[in-house]
């Protein structure tokens, strides 16, 4: 089946940029998403990118998509303690078993902020 | 405010009992989903529904059941047949362009 892979942990210093990486396998993905999960809470949609785009910027967040390498990244500029969370990459995949709008999620990257 | 609510936030169940988790949305979304989250496992799809009175099994449907009698509501029942039900359960609904919005989750613990 299709797979989305992420590193489990990323540690950065407060004020630095964080770059969270994700690889996916489905070349027919139309949308790719980044979600944030704080402890004990649901997932919050941060941003998404359509597959015909290379980059999308939204305030401190920059998403880069390399379709050739099936690589997606999320850059958080000026990382703050409030950014500490688990970040999930997801691809929209009609073959995921979740219907036409089904998503396949990575296992999440824990972002740890050092003071 | 528009959004998705789940209740209860915490739920304790004795072995052999069925329990039902509530999920309600007022976003007017047709599609709704139930996921299970275990540490280090990411999200796994249990059931989904693309329209009222219709639902489909996801990847780990065994031991669970759902209903979709109203557009706003998609309750999940964890039956006694589910051998390892302790987990964090997340409900979501999606827009026509596939953006999924999540509820706050229910943490189920089997005693």
Image: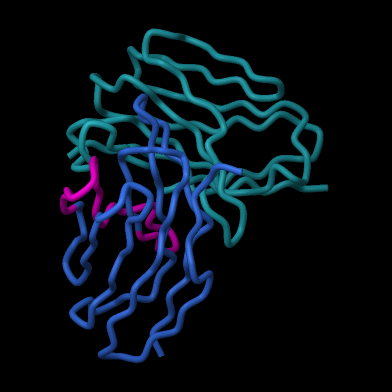
* Residue B50 magenta: yes
Question: Is residue B5 depicted above or below B9 in this figure?
Answer: above
Q: Main secondary structure of the magenta part?
A: strand
- How far from the left and from the top, in percent, is residue A17? 71, 29
Quadrant assignment for the N terminus of chain B: top right
- How far from the left and from the top, in percent, is residue B70? 30, 52
Question: Is residue A68 depicted above or below B45 in this figure?
Answer: above
* Horizontal arrangement in the rendering, residue B71 relative to residue A18 (left or right): left
* Horizontal arrangement in the rendering, residue B42 relative to residue A47 (left or right): left
* Horizontal arrangement in the rendering, residue A55 relative to residue A83 (left or right): left
- How far from the left and from the top, in percent, is residue B88? 44, 65
Q: Which stretch appears magenta? A: B36-57
Q: Nearer the viewer, residue A54 or B79?
A: B79
Q: How is the image coloured?
A: by chain
Q: How many marks?
A: 0
Point 34% across, 73% down: residue: B20
Question: Is residue A45 depicted above or below B76 in this figure?
Answer: above
Quadrant assignment for the C terminus of chain B: bottom left
Point 55% across, 33% down: residue: A20
* Residue B65 magenta: no
Q: Nearer the viewer, residue A46 or B50?
A: B50
Chain B: drawing colour = blue
- Res B44 quadrant in image: bottom left
Point 54% across, 27% down: residue: A47
Chain A: drawing colour = cyan
Point 38% across, 69% down: residue: B21
Q: Nearer the viewer, residue A112 or B56?
A: B56
Question: Is residue A24 depicted above or below A80 in this figure?
Answer: above
- How far from the left and from the top, in percent, is residue B57? 16, 53
Q: Nearer the viewer, residue B34 or A31?
A: B34
């Amino acid at each position: 089946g299709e797979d989305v892979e992420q590193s489990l942990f990323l540690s950065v210093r407060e004020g630095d940029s964080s770059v969270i990486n994700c690889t996916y396998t489905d070349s027919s993905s139309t949308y790719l998403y980044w979600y944030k999960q704080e402890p004990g809470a649901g997932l919050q949609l941060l941003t998404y990118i359509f597959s015909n785009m290379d980059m999308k910027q939204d305030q401190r967040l920059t998403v880069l998509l390399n379709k050739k390498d099936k690589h997606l990244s999320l850059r958080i500029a000026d990382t703050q303690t409030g950014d500490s969370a688990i970040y999930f990459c997801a691809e929209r995949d009609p073959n995921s078993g979740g219907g036409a709008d089904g998503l396949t999620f990575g296992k999440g990257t824990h972002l740890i902020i050092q003071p | 405010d528009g959004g998705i609510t789940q209740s209860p936030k915490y739920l304790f169940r004795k072995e052999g009992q069925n329990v039902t988790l509530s999920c309600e949305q007022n976003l007017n979304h047709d599609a709704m989903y139930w996921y299970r989250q275990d540490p280090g496992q990411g999200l796994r799809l249990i059931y989904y529904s693309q329209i009222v009175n219709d639902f489909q099994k996801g990847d780990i449907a065994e031991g669970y059941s759902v209903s979709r009698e109203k557009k706003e509501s998609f309750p999940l029942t964890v039956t006694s047949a589910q051998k390892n039900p302790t987990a964090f359960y997340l409900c979501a609904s999606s827009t026509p362009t596939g953006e999924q919005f999540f509820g706050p989750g229910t943490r189920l613990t089997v005693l």
